[in-house]
Image (cartoon, helix red, strand yellow):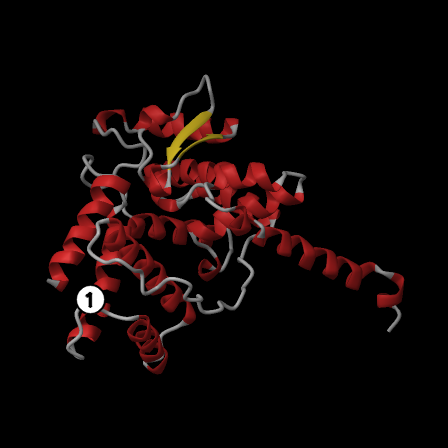
Amino acid sequence: MNRDLIDFFLEMLVAERGVTANTYQAYQTDLKDFMDYLQARDLEIDRVSKRDIHQYFEFLGQEGKTARTAIRRLSCLRQFYGFLVQENIRSDDPTYLMQSPCLPQSLPKYLSEQEVFNLLSASEFLDDYRRSLVAKAALEILYSSGLRISELLSLRKDQIQQATKILRIYGKGRRERLIPVSDAAVKAALVLKKNDASLKSVFLFPGRNPQNHLTRQGFDKILFEVALKANLDPGRLSPHVLRHSFASHMLAHGADLRSLQMMLGHADISTTQIYTHLQTEHLKKTVQDFHPLSMKK
């Protein structure tokens, strides 16, 4: 019965919400862990009480699970039991009014503008010509649009139009957004498309098999090469760091939070507001470095 309900829920996620393979796998893993916990205590997943849920999260803490893991598990269980209530399998939701664990706030890491410019320049000088074209196009698009890495790698060639310079992106939850990209990004993409014309792939960044797009692992190797060429520590560089750099630099140059939220594809503006903390930290450092009273030491 437990497994049947989980399969029923997972089928709904695919059919009605169109979740990605990664999201599906995450829900499946979290629910399996919860089911294993219940089975070890002879509990049925459709009959657990609020107390049972609380004890499960106490168990996670005893196992050394992080607050981030607990938050994700609670979100998964809320959606699962909300689904059971909606389908009249349960009359109540045992996760109702449960408080999420507090997550320590950490500011996103990002590069300076000069470091990004160095990366873009270095991407043109990789030893392999095609990898250089891929690196140049990918970095230009990432930095001018703030795309997630999954959105970048799944880009199709017909999504890059020289006339409009607008990307139509389907992000998390299949939410659509339109993102303008720079002239340099479009130019780099067109050069790559021309070079790859013989590959007969629909993807702008095809993998070894042109029927599939480049993998995250394959892109990470290219990013590693570019970092070395730019004399940048590869440990500081990732697609997410470039996304944070895009957002931070946009805000520093006067972009408003609402526009930034739309471009990043955040469902809630509170997620975007983390970048205001970066500006606060920058202002504090500016005062510490240049205010006359701070300089008198």
**Which residue was labeled with disc 1?**
45
From the viewer's perspective, is 16 left or right of 173? left
The kind of residue on which mark 1 rests is Ile
Quadrant (top left, top right, bottom left, bottom right) of the N terminus? bottom left
| Vertical side of 218 occupied by 41: above or below | below
Where residue 234 appears, as percent x and y from the top left, is 45, 58
From the viewer's perspective, is 95 left or right of 211? right
Residue sticking out furthest to the front: 91
Where residue 194 appears, as percent x and y from the top left, is 33, 24
Any part of residue 13 in sight: yes
Residue sticking out furthest to the top: 163
Q: Secondary structure at mark 1?
A: loop
Q: Could you tell me which residue is drawn at 67 percent across and 59 percent down?
A: 281
Any part of residue 128 in sight: no
Quadrant (top left, top right, bottom left, bottom right) of the C terminus? bottom right
To which quarter of the image does residue 142 belong?
top left
Where residue 256 appears, as percent x and y from the top left, is 63, 39
From the viewer's perspective, is 32 left or right of 94? left
| Vertical side of 179 occupied by 110: above or below | below
Where residue 164 appears, as percent x and y from the top left, is 46, 19
Pick whichever, 178 or 132, lies toward us. 178
